[in-house]
Image: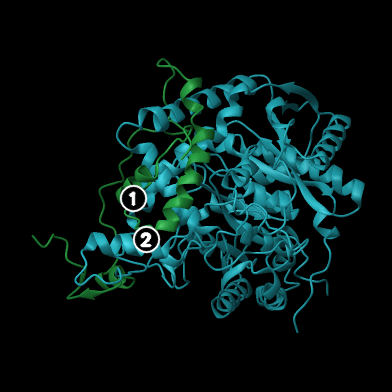
Amino acid sequence: MSESSQITREEVAHVAHLARIELTEAELDHLRSDLDAILEHVKVVQSVVDADTPAMSHPIPVTNVFRLDLNVAGLTADEALAGAPESEEQRFLVPRILGED
Amino acid sequence: MTDLTKATAAELSDLLANKEVTSREVTQAALDRIAAVDGEVHAFLHVANDAALADADAVDAARAAGEPLAALAGVPIAVKDALTTVGMPTTSGSRILEGWVPPYDATVVAKLKAARMPILGKTNMDEFAMGSSTEHSAYGPTRNPWNTNVIPGGSGGGSAAAVAAFEAPLAIGSDTGGSIRQPAAVTGTVGVKPTYGGVSRYGLIALASSLDQIGPVSRTVLDAALLHEVIGGHDPKDSTSLDKPATSFVAAAQRADLSGVRVGIVKELSGEGFDAGVKQRFEEAVALMTAAGADIVEVSCPSFVHALAAYYLVLPSEASSNLAKFDAMRFGLRVSPEGVSEPSAEQVMAATRDAGFGDEVKRRLILGTYALSSGYYDAYYGSAQKVRTLIAQDFDRVFADVDVLMSPTSPTPAWQLGAKLDDPMAMYLQDIATIPANLAGIPGISVPAGLSDGLPVGVQFLAPALADDRLYNAGAALERLLVEKWGTHLIGQAPELEVAR
């Protein structure tokens, strides 16, 4: 790894875990060099703004919007479950969510 | 009878209203054309033969019964696979959604149905709209009808190619950083990114929610305006939808008058990195517009040079959050990790996302997760949001002096398939002229400007938020000047595709 690198292989592996994407060893190597090139380009944003520049999260200013409090038809259970990988008793069937210990 | 596949949507609208043709004839002609050329072009991921013909018959019956109908009733349309459609698979170009049939329609799809426009099928796209060439589709690339060895642009290469190959008179696209306008430019067609909030995003599979906007894809400016009036307007299901009517676009396209219109040429979007052929067509367009009475001035938007950097932080950050819903639990693919007995939900999610997402999606999700992670948030995502403010301020400043801005849409014509696949930054640079509009939420249009080495080149107009009508006026005016010069629309000069028998 060259000294000018923006991101290490360990950081890529850590972020991939945060993003819940299991990467192969080859993918980790490839992504590290791609991300390095991209970060090298995008890091300029840090040097062109200062503390006084307001941040913009949304292009058109909007305030919170509430819909009218009316009953509207939603999806039926069958419709909601139609695309599920697995279902049982009108519920989504999922793998275990707790650890073994 | 004239070739119905070559007719514009406006012409079809008149033919249908005068009962000179039926929607079944128009729709069947489009489906026949798809059968003949889509093996080569691959604009479609799904073709809805039976449903489209049933819709066509229903609208023909309604017309025969004298029911009042919308202007585009009976005119068929293709829809980008990023929009949900009841009864049709919706994949967003990804393996992770292979075979998924949504239980609800996107608002734009519901509006097309309410206008009685038969939906021909779903068009190919870069996976989750991440790309500029449609090569990142999990289902194989779309090819450019002008030359099937070159890319059709992206992410909406399928919609642009369908319209350019005369497989559909109209299509729906979505534009996050140029995904409607750049494919329009490189296929010799018209594409519009409306003002943010002008068209409902409900049912659009989100890429970056503060940048995404659905818009029209067509062969003429008037056709785009007709479609924009169908799909635009307020939607209570989209909290960012603006409470403004979608009118005046067709009238503006019909006006097409440049006299006294002040046009700003953005210095930062015309120089270095732009192909000689692209610059030449652009300068010819400027000269034609000047002769037609436009008042052309050069303007500077110094922050635009940082737009790409800000975009490639804002987009991946928002995408990493939006695509967290692909967790293998409620819909889509589920893959269990190999060699793990009784894997946890978390392990299944990670294995599914590795198997179901392509390289470009993984690249951007990991970049976005990094930019949002503790210790980097302020430096990356926070700074990018500030650059966004600077870009919006540049637009505000120049729009105080000019009515519209003008630039080439894309720095180069279409390139050979595969040429930029291994170099993400080279691919990203293709969107340099289209990205600022998304960051600021303003509308843009790409209009054909001619050819460079036999491949189409586009000119882009930008207008202030909610002034989409100015795009239709300026775009239609330039289109008319060029059609007068060429004796045909640019798309009329496209080589014939080989037809499968």
Q: Is residue B364 left or right of residue B253?
A: left
**Which of the chains is green?**
A
Residue B21 at x, y = what percent?
A: 73, 73
Looking at the figure, which quarter contains the C terminus of chain B? bottom right
Rendered residue at 79%/70% (across/down): B497
Instruction: Tell me if I can see residue A35 in this picture.
Output: yes
- Residue neighbourhood size for the residue with mark 2, other residues' Cα within 10 Å, grouped as few (<14), some (14–19), many (≥20): many
Which tint was used for chain B?
A: cyan
- Residue neighbourhood size for the residue with mark 1, other residues' Cα within 10 Å, grouped as few (<14), some (14–19), many (≥20): many
Pointer 2 with pointer 1, Cβ within 8 A: yes
Residue B393 at x, y = what percent?
A: 54, 22
Residue type (three-letter) at the residue carrying disc 1: Ala
Q: Secondary structure at mark 2?
A: helix
Looking at the figure, which quarter contains the N terminus of chain B? bottom right
Instruction: Tell me if I can see residue B248 in this picture.
Output: no
- Residue on which the image places disc 2: B353
Q: How many marks?
A: 2
Residue B289 at x, y = what percent?
A: 83, 33
The Cα–Cα distance between marks 2 and 1, rounded to whole angstroms, is 9 Å
Residue B463 at x, y = what percent?
A: 63, 33
- Residue on which the image places disc 1: A19
Residue type (three-letter) at the residue carrying disc 2: Arg
Q: Secondary structure at mark 1?
A: loop
Q: In front: B25, or B152?
A: B152
Rendered residue at 69%/51% (across/down): B184
Rendered residue at 79%/33% (across/down): B258
Q: In front: B186, or A99?
A: A99
Q: Is residue A42 left or right of residue B249?
A: left
Q: In front: B357, or B210?
A: B357
Q: Residue furthest bottom?
A: B501
| Chain identity of mark 1 | A
